Every structure is written in structure tokens, then in C-alpha cells.
Image (cartoon, helix red, strand yellow):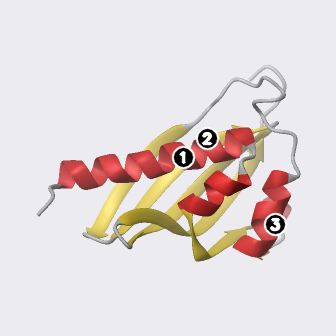
Amino acid sequence: MMGADHAYAEVLACLDDYFDGLYRCDAALLERVFHPEARYFGAPEGALVFRSMAEYLPIVAGRVSGEQRREARADRVDAIEFAGPHVAMARVRCRIGPRIFTDFLSMVKDDGRWRIAAKVFHTEIQAEGE
């Protein structure tokens, strides 16, 4: 049986791919990170947003990436908690353009690898120079 340190490292590797996919607007990488049935929820400016992966991934692919804009990365893992060997929750932060995202990522270990089952997020606009 694999230990907690190994599971933690596996979740971190998944989150690294998540951050890379967002920064590069790499929908193919994000498709591997998200479970096919994953859901995306948020309430930017108070309006509820809900998307399936079929709706969300093309939006990401259509963006000009932070990498192309030569933005400095601002990715951070705040916390990872395990509910069991196949269920975890990660709270992460990242920047996309002027928006700072706080994401709650429900994660499942599916077919031997960790994937995001749901993303629930909040955004704030970062003022110039912050």
C-alpha cells in the first residue's frame, strides 16, 4: 500500500499540470487533468456560472495564454486534504490576466490517477501593480 506522502505527491503532480494547462491555455492538458464528467462552478460578479468540460475547455483554448502574454506565474497550493485514499480536496490560487482565482478542487483517484471532479471558484480583480 502506498503511503500518504506518495498520494500527496500524486495530487501535487496533478495540480502542477492544472496550473500549466491554465497558464498555457492547453485544453488537451486540462482534459487529462479533469475527469470527463467534471463540473465547473463559480459566481464572478455574483452571477452563477456552471459549465461542463465540453463547454469549459474550448473557452480556455480560445484565450490568449499567460505564457504568450509573458505574464509572471502566480500559482499556489494553499491546502490539500484527503477524505480517503481516493478522494481529496485542494484549495489553490492562480492568476489569469488581472483576475486572481481561488479554486476549490474536488479530486478523485480514477483508474490509478488523480483527476479533478469539480472546480468551484471565486475571482477578484487585481489592481495594476499589486
Residue under numbered circle 1: 17
Q: Nearer the viewer, residue 94 or 112?
A: 112
| Res 30 → quadrant | bottom right
Residue beneath the point at 88% across and 52% down: 62
Amino acid type, label 1? Asp
Residue 2, percent from left and from top: 15, 58
Q: Is residue 14 left or right of residue 58?
A: left
Residue 20: give its label. 2
Residue 119, percent from left and from top: 60, 65
Secondary structure of residue under mark 3:
helix
Measured Cα–Cα span from mark 1 to mark 3 = 29 Å
Could one spot residue 68 in this view of the protein? yes
Q: Give neighbour class at mark 3: few <14, some 14-19, many 20+ (Cα, 10 Å).
A: few
Amino acid type, label 3? Gly
Badge 1 or badge 3: first in the primary sequence:
1
Badge 3 or badge 2: first in the primary sequence:
2
Q: Give neighbour class at mark 2: few <14, some 14-19, many 20+ (Cα, 10 Å).
A: some
Q: Is residue 3 left or right of residue 112?
A: left
Q: Nearer the viewer, mark 3 or mark 2?
A: 2
67 over 119 or under it: above or below: above
Secondary structure of residue under mark 2:
helix
Residue under numbered circle 3: 46
